[in-house]
Image (cartoon, grey):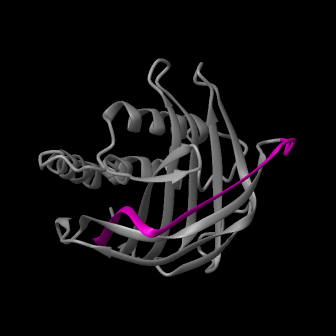
Amino acid sequence: MKRLLPYLACAGLLAACSDAGSVNPDAIPAEEIVAVRMALDSAFLHDTTLDASFTGDSGLYALMSALVFPFVDRATRVVQGADTMRVVGIEFDIDATQGGAHVVSNLTAVLAWKGYNATSRTMDSVFFLIGSGRAPVSDTLWERFTLDTAGTGTGFVIHQASDSTVTKWLTRGGHLHTTSSSYGSSQGNSSFSVAHGTLSGEYMLTAKLVPDSSTMVTTALDFGSGTQAIKEKIRGTIP
């Protein structure tokens, strides 16, 4: 994580600046996004059953937790029957050099949740999908973590009980489609910048319980009218 210190410092400064503006109607209450992040951290930071390139303190999730999630301060409300989901899109754009090697990575993620319990400060359900490339994306979801392969993605369903115990399901099928994205002016510098905007698309997934596949869940979400989104760009030389 020492290599990330320059980016973490910049991310912290930008996140502080992003909180200084006027209140957005899609703003996420602080205690709610804390519950979402706690559920995600519990599911992934210390996991030993999933792909190590994603989990643990040096996997992609830890990177996104440090550099992306501090900017997730707005989420669109999408009504599904009796439930209201909060949804945010994420696009990650890296075109840089590290150790003399050219590193290019384009990822799209969708983070959604519902069922915040103010008493226990837990989140009933969190949905986290990651696909390769940026809009438009048409990825098939499966259980393997192969985001360097175009057309593939993976996803998770996380349930957090009122005692904070976390259960998670890993995708076995489904798709992630994004049709378009647009962003306003970015904040940051030539090496690291963040922009807010919108992302449109939909997903459907079938997932099985980790680690024993004993139960299965199916869920879908249409955000074709657009959802709040952020785009992060990293350029230059990565330490």
Residue 139 drawn at (x, y percent) = 63, 75
Residue at point 32% right, 76% down?
182
Residue at point 72% right, 62% down?
144
User: As displayed, is residue 127 above or below residue 138?
Assistant: above
Residue 208 seen from this side: yes
Task: Judge left or right: residue 158 versus residue 13.
Answer: right
Which residue ends up furthest to the front in the rendered image? Answer: 81
Residue at point 35% right, 68% down?
198
User: As displayed, is residue 90 above or below residue 73?
Assistant: below
- Residue 170 lies in magenta, yes or no? no
Q: How many marks?
A: 0
Residue 111 drawn at (x, y percent) = 49, 53
Residue 58 seen from this side: no
User: As displayed, is residue 107 above or below residue 217?
Assistant: below
Task: Judge left or right: residue 118 versus residue 19.
Answer: right
Of 1 and 28, nearer the camera is 28
Residue at point 17% right, 48% down?
13
Residue 172 drawn at (x, y percent) = 78, 60
Residue span colored magenta: 212-236
Of 137 and 98, nearer the camera is 137
Quadrant, the C terminus: bottom left
